[in-house]
Image (tube, helix red, strand yellow):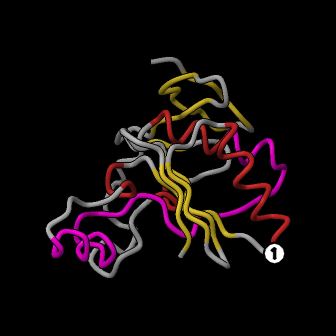
Amino acid sequence: METITINGKTHLIHSLHDDAVVFQTEDGELYTEHFSVNELRCKCAKCMKQKPHKMQPEALAKMEGIRFRMNRAFSPTSAYRCAEHPEEAKKVKKGKEPGQHNKGVAMDIPVYGGAQRYQVVQEAIKAGARGIGVANSFVHIDWREGEPMSWKY
């Protein structure tokens, strides 16, 4: 596996994408220049950011590209979620499969106002997002399989 040294720290390169470089820790967890392993892990009470995440490299690269094009720092309010995360568990209880966060292809991006919300949606569409959910304080973006969807919270 190739490596690159940035600011004196060596990073393993997992994959190169049009939008970004995806790095890999020695334990196999993925991260990018702007999204740390800790930010990508499940935040539920059972995991408490201690269990490895399962974010998919293509989705992570696309999110890095969105962040770069927006030229705005943000920390996802939610990225990977384990199957026991309350939001994912609700879906299973209703007889559905866990959602896109559990599949490692979704991220919720915080927004502050309509202009930022619009910009996130616009960039998500440019990046080929197939699921976009809009709330007052965040935008959900995912790269699901099947029919594209949009919804409001």
Q: Position of residue 48 (x, y in %)?
A: 37, 75
At x 52%, y 17%, the residue is: 2
**Residue labelled with disc 1:** 113
52 magenta-colored: no
Is 90 displayed left or right of 76 in the figure? Answer: left
**Dot 1, crowdedness within 10 Å: few (<14), some or many (≥20)?**
few
Q: Nearer the viewer, residue 144 or 74?
A: 144
Q: Position of residue 47 (x, y in %)?
A: 31, 71
At x 77%, y 58%, the residue is: 73
Q: Position of residue 37 (x, y in %)?
A: 49, 53
Is 136 displayed left or right of 108 in the figure? Answer: right
75 magenta-colored: yes
**86 shown above or below 25:** below
Q: Nearer the viewer, residue 69 or 13?
A: 69
Report the span colored magenta. 65-94
Q: Position of residue 88 (x, y in %)?
A: 29, 69
At x 70%, y 37%, the residue is: 126
> Three-letter amino acid code at disc 1?
Gly
**12 shown above or below 91:** above
Residue 92 position by quadrant? bottom left
